[in-house]
Image (cartoon, coloured by chain):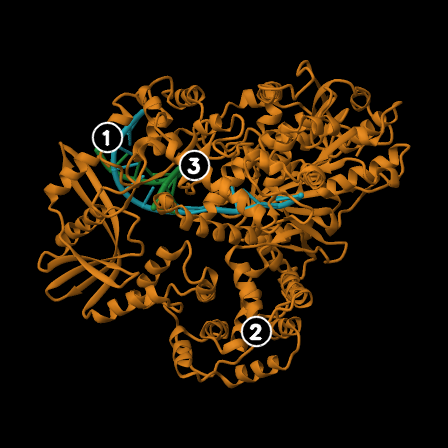
Chain colours: A orange, B cyan, C green
Amino acid sequence: MSGVEPNPEQRDLIEATEGLYLVDAGAGTGKTFTVTHRYANVVERDGIGPDDVLLVTFTNNAAEEMRERIVRHSEYGVRELADAPIRTFHSLSHDILDEHGHDAPTFLGLDETITGSTRIIEDDVVERALFREFVGQFVDDRPEYEPFFAALSGTTELLDLITELSAKGVFPDADGWYRDGESHLDGDLEAFETLFAELNEPRNGGSRQSRLRRKLYRYGENGTYLPEAPEKREIRGDGKRVPPEVAERAFEDDRTALKGFVHDVFHGYLGFALRRNYLNFGFLQLFAFVLLCEDRDLRERLEYEYVMVDEFQDSSAIQFKLTLLLAGTNNVCAVGDWKQSIYGFQYADVDNIREFDERLERFAAELNRDAERVTFPTSPVERKRLTRNYRSTQSILDFSTHALTARATKRESLDAEAITESITPLTADTDRDHSRIEALASEDEHEAILARIDAIVGDDAYAVEGDDGEYRVPEYGDIAVLTRTRDFGRDLLDTASEYGLPVAYEGGIEVFRTDAAKLLLAWLRILERDADRGWALVLEEAGYTVDEARAILDRGAYPEAMVAFRESLRELETFGGVARRVFDRYGREGPTADVVLETVQSVHETTTFTRGELIRFIEAAIADGSTHEVDAGAGTNAVTVQTIHATKGLEYPIVILANMNADRFPSTGGGASDVVYADPIGLRRRTVYSEEAHGVPHVYDDWRTDVLTACLPRSYDEERRLLYVAITRAESHVVLAAGADPNAFLESLPVDVESVDPDLSAFRPEDEERSPFTVDVPVPDGPASYSPHTFIDDAVFEGDVGGRGMEFGTAVHEFAERYVRDEPVVHEGDDEANVRALIDSLDGEKRAEVDAFLPLTVDGERVTIGGVIDLLHLTPDRAEIVDYKTDLTRHAEDEYEKQLSVYYHVVEGVHPDREVSASILYTRDGERREIDPLSEAELRDLVRTHRG
DNA sequence: GGATCTTTTCTTTTT
DNA sequence: GAAAAGATCC
């Protein structure tokens, strides 16, 4: 941090108080220092007081820090600033609604009111449950929307959409969309065509097909389109690029019905929330925005003479607009750094800062369309920058900029020059530069990191600057390990505690997904009602095989030691006591177990939960992966482990950036939702519900949306910024660490990667893992693919989503596969029971998972139709194909017919002497239906029509 | 260089 | 199940 006196750039900004400013304040440039001084400078003017200056931050912590520091720099004291508007957008909105929001909903055509008792829902688990309840009612009231719900995979997706629209300032009113909301939903054809054209540019100077054409190779392969969908060759064209007219053809369609559906759900939910007397965080801003738009007097009363927004790169569209409505003059100052924008998934919009002028103008014009709401001129915008960095050495700063041009994949092409040009270079304040920037890769990444930490501590080659400015050797507390994912951090933490290294994890952790929590859950279930699901896990943990466990469960003859332990647990009075006893017995100590214990204890103290309710609480916590804050608590001199996101704004002498692995960071792949809202294509749906197809309702895929989403650019910019944020946390040294397969980032950074074989002899692992119960039956080896964790996961799964949920289809499939292969199977619901009954009823040989690819020749071209057979049942003269289906409405029946026909011909080829048949088993009602396979000629025709 | 096939992934967290 | 990277074939 900078010294007491501001540097010239800082001083310049502190004194430039009048007018519009966009400040590019890079990492470690003393931003908070400057902003607080600027604030102090403003409030010291005649006639200006704290009430005239709005200072917005993004977290309550940051607001508090600002407030404290302003007290130090200004003539105002703690008390005078206590009520000063130094706030987050959310708390500001909350206050505005508290005081003036009673009738705000009427502006959206809602009769309900906002009152002082309206709660804010903070827990999204709770909100999701409420939303499900709302949807239940909604479906009853509005049966005409049944088809839309049939084409959706879940309600959460719909709630996510509502959250996203709220953040982007698109909301419904009584009979349409508030202000210009609808234009956002319609998308922007022109912008889309630009995007399309860009992606459709042939590559390599015209000799290679465009990226878009390459992407559309899979057009139609993962779904069924209605017959009027264009064929693949029509979409892809026969040259190097996709025919340009495809853009408009895919873009233009009538989405009145879809928009109507989303409108009614959104509007209905707003009413529901208000009737239930709650708002979510997004709705706070939504109503505050509406109120400020509609109530001119209120707006004029609330307007501030000076507005400063910190961390502007984290703002969303609606927050930008709120800023404009709250500013009474053009004394607006937005401070931020686009390079540190890493909250896109929370709808932070990096273009708010990157294209500030343009957005400012556009938003102001939108707001002023029918009345003057933004009363000040939106230009000129003066730019300021802070370029002196008080945190890192010059070599770390130089290195960090390479992160922004690092390739995310081997083949990614980047305009490195353009990126470099947009970066404001930072200059280190210190002349000293002894930084070590190194990279290591090791098969045992955890151990390699721990070994490196051990080597760094006390080594003066990694000297760090002490408070007195003198170099000193590093301690554990100087080191932070940053990772992309929580999982990695948690695992590293566990490994570290095994070796007795002082490591503390800071941030949210999915405590209930840890093995410790699962063990506790198992014992609670045993206590409650000797539940098999509990015993199964406990037996497995003790080393019993699946068959043994099953036998024990069947007879209810549990090992004596375990029964005795159960009785000893029964005597304990508190949940915390039970947890402690369980963890003691299993030797689970360390931070993760502590958090489970603390959470359980606090649940006991703050609620009147019964044991059954506690079990359900833990089950719910596991199901939605809810996180709990882990308290550092491992003493002061410990290595900090954090996710990169959690580390924002912090700094450490030595940063180890871990988990630079190809399969983790950046993440590629991933699915897409059924309803898509994205710039510039607007609101689309991926699946279409059709009534008429076969006399039975069916769901079809929408070819237009498939084409449109293929055109949306896939960018790894935010991943690069994440890398940048991590590196710029470091004051003195940076170590990048990877496992056996380093990612492309690491390969394209200018650093040598050292292969490491960690020497762990220096570590003394704590006590060998002991089994708390002796195994009193002989233990045969499990099947080759047996994994101890599958048992645990399976046991938890059922509690998970009530035995169903998103993994439902996969679970049944997996069950069958394992059952047929004689692999461990514990969890069994109705669907699985159906499948088991079917398999049991078959004699002869059964095989699972036979890949089936049927090569056909269509119009002289070879096409391959692929699939996976769920079960192949062989008897001496027959080969029967069985396919499990869990949901009757997902696909058109002819799709199943086609699939099974492929299997049929493949199996026929493999088993020429057997009579081949194919059938579908609907697991939901146990019904079995024989399919009459299409001939190869018929398949050929089908391929010709669907072309996919 | 394009088509086809195989493998691997589906995060992050604040209000 | 869907998307995208990477490997392999031609």
The correct choice, above or below, for A325 with respect to A756 in the image is above
What whole-number distance in Å separates the C-alpha atoms at marks 1 and 2? 62 Å
What whole-number distance in Å separates the C-alpha atoms at marks 3 and 1? 23 Å
The chain letter for the residue carrying disc 1 is A
Q: Nearer the viewer, residue A659 or A903?
A: A903
Which residue appears farthest toward the top when viewing the image? Answer: A380
Q: Amino acid at mark 2?
A: Arg
Picture mark count = 3
Which residue appears farthest toward the left when viewing the image? Answer: A913
Q: Are marks 1 and 2 on the same chain?
A: yes
What whole-number distance in Å separates the C-alpha atoms at marks 2 and 3? 51 Å
Which residue appears farthest toward the right when viewing the image? Answer: A75
Q: Amino acid at mark 3?
A: Val
Q: Find disc 3 in the rendering and name its residue.
A: A676
Could you say where residue A611 lies in the image, as x and y percent from the top left?
58, 72
Q: Find disc 2 in the rendering and name its residue.
A: A770
The chain letter for the residue carrying disc 2 is A
User: Would residue A795 be visible to someone looking at this image?
Assistant: yes
- Give the secondary structure at mark 3: strand
The chain letter for the residue carrying disc 3 is A
Picture quadrant where residue A723 is located: top right
Q: Amino acid at mark 1?
A: Glu
- Give the secondary structure at mark 2: loop
Q: Nearer the viewer, residue A554 or A790?
A: A554
Q: Earlier in the sequence, mark 2 or mark 3?
A: 3
Q: Find disc 1 in the rendering and name its residue.
A: A231
Could you say where residue A217 lies in the image, as x and y percent from the top left?
30, 32
